[in-house]
Amino acid sequence: MVGAMERNQPLPALALALVLAAGAGIGGAARASTPLAEDEHVTRSLLAAAVGDKIRRECPTISARVFTALQEASALRRYALSKGHSEGDIEAFLEDRAEEQRLRRLRDAYLAEHGAREGDAESYCRLGRDEIARNSLAGRLLRAD
């Protein structure tokens, strides 16, 4: 798991991929009525992971809580399955370029709104410390070194 903590490794994607690869499919679930892209819980969870990931990559004094990230990814996978999504639905959603771009826009807007500025590591560190102090989902995925 040491490699997962490197600054250039996309932790949320890695965590989700590991959980998906390790998870066994659940058969017989009812078909989902809400697409994953429209599920607010899914969006909020992935946004928090993306925010935390960007913070830990930009701030040299903040790192990821890898085990917590894996737990959250597993919980999100279970949530999607409980809502009737198949493993295939989840994989397709995670690989969808348009969804990746949508999440990136949401992440960048959140970061800008909360004072993080490209090229200013301290602005990411400050936001990371704030997220940790607020015990937000993004903050729970981070550790101040």
Image (spheres, rainbow, N blue to C red):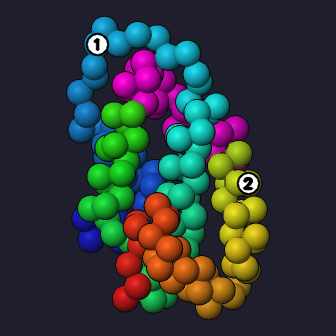
* Rendered position, 107 above or below 2: above
Q: Quadrant of residue 33?
A: top right
Q: Which residues are magenta?
A: 80-101
Q: Is residue 111 visible?
A: yes
Residue under circle 2? Answer: 105
Q: Amino acid at mark 2?
A: Arg
Question: Percent x, y for residue 134?
Answer: 50, 74
Residue in the foreground of this view, choosing between 55 and 8: 55
Q: Quadrant of residue 100?
A: top right
* Rendered position, 62 above or below 27: below
Residue in the foreground of this view, choosing between 46 and 131: 131
- The verdict on residue 128 being magenta is no
Number of the label disc, if any, that sits on residue 27: 1
Q: Amino acid at mark 1?
A: Gly
* Rendered position, 124 above or below 53: below
The secondary element bearing badge 2 is classed as helix
Image side of residue 94 versus residue 100, left or right: left
Do callouts 1 and 2 mark residues in contact (Cβ within 8 Å)?
Answer: no
